[in-house]
Image (spheres, helix red, strand yellow):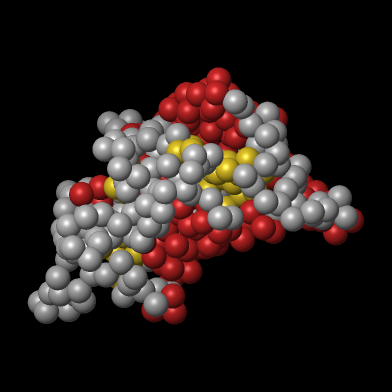
Amino acid sequence: MTFKVSEPRADRRRAVVWAAGLALSALLASCGGGERVSTFAPTRVLAFGDEASVIDDSGRTGNGRKYTINALAADNATLDCAANPIWVQYLASRFGLVFPQCNPAGVSAPASRIYAVAGATVADVKRQVDLQLAADGFNDRDLVTVLAGANDILAQYAQYPALPEAQLTAAVVQAGSDLAVQVNRVAAAGGKVLVAFVPNLGQTPFGVAEAADPAKGTDRTTLLAKLTESFNGELSFRIRNDGYQIGLIRSEWFDPLISSPSTAGLANVTQAACTTPSAYNCSSATLRPADPVTNTLTATAETWLWADALQLSPVGHLRLGQAADGRARGNPF
């Protein structure tokens, strides 16, 4: 199901300013002001955000675990982190770059870095940016990715109905504004930033299950959709986007997967593919088998959109990575 939600807490002035900003970006491009003068070739990718951008190599093996369906090597026991890449991996690979956390080929001293951590909120992104600024800062050959906000939205949603929707919305709007501050901060320091919007949390397996709970009511999917839209809308509104430093990855890559899954080659967009509660512990050996009672097909990394209740499967990451790659190459960085 796709829900169309109204513009989050935005008055007419905000809508006009937002539209004017988009029009200005288009004008810059059409007049040459936004045209690329040379091909952008980053020397490193710096990933900020939450578990959607994490490769956990706490064992220092160069073959880290991810929050998706982890691939196994031929021995059916060892992780193969190069397979089933997450979106930032895919993006980096398109420019011939790798992260230290997944470096099975032994590339010497990879310059790319993952600052993202599991469970991160917008406040944590500020600390991640602080770390990079304290290291060696940002430059115009840095491709910086930012994907965060889902945990902020879920934290507010968890307080409903004890707190009214208006109060929850105000909190996620503030979180969107705060993340925009960090994006602007990185851009001002010289980094080229790709900002991925949070996918509609009402259309995750978590959101679907919330709506199906008779004790909670079907309005839960709509509420999650509204909160997500409120966060993304404020983030977009507050970013100082002149068409050169920041590229936005909106929901155009995600919406068709939900509205027309078969066209995208997907068999399931409402359930988790993994039998483990968390995708972190999921692999190709722990996928949901076929269920003839519910007429559910065997889960695969290629045909199911979600790994767990909230995290994308490899095909979901691929679609997001392709959108990011297209934006990085199409934006006049």
In the drawing, does residue 9 fall left or right of residue 216? right
**Is 318 left, or right, of 183 in this rendering?**
left
Q: Is residue 303 above or below residue 150?
A: below
Q: Nearer the viewer, residue 314 or 180?
A: 314
> What is the residue that sits farthest to the right in this orientation?
31
Task: Give the answer, above or below, for where 107 lies relative to 77.
Answer: above
The quarter of the image holding the N terminus is bottom left
In the depicted structure, whether residue 126 falls above or below residue 165: above
Estimate the x, y position of residue 181 in percent, counting from the top left: 60, 29
Q: Please state if 239 lies on the left or on the right of 107 as rendered.
A: right
Identify the residue at image location x=40%, y=39%. Answer: 50
**In the displayed image of the protein, which residue is found farthest to the top?**
134
Q: Residue at x 11, y 79 (%)?
A: 292
Is residue 210 shown to the viewer in this render? no
Indicate the position of residue 326 as horizontal and vertical percent values: 61, 61
Res 100 visible: yes
Q: Nearer the viewer, residue 216 or 92?
A: 92
Q: Which residue is rendered at x = 79% and y = 54% of the image?
A: 38
| Residue 113 in the image, given as x and y percentages of width and height | 49, 38
Residue 276, percent from left and from top:
16, 53
Taking 55 as reference, is 177 left or right? right
The residue at 24%/60% (across/down) is 72
**Number of marks present in the image shown:** 0
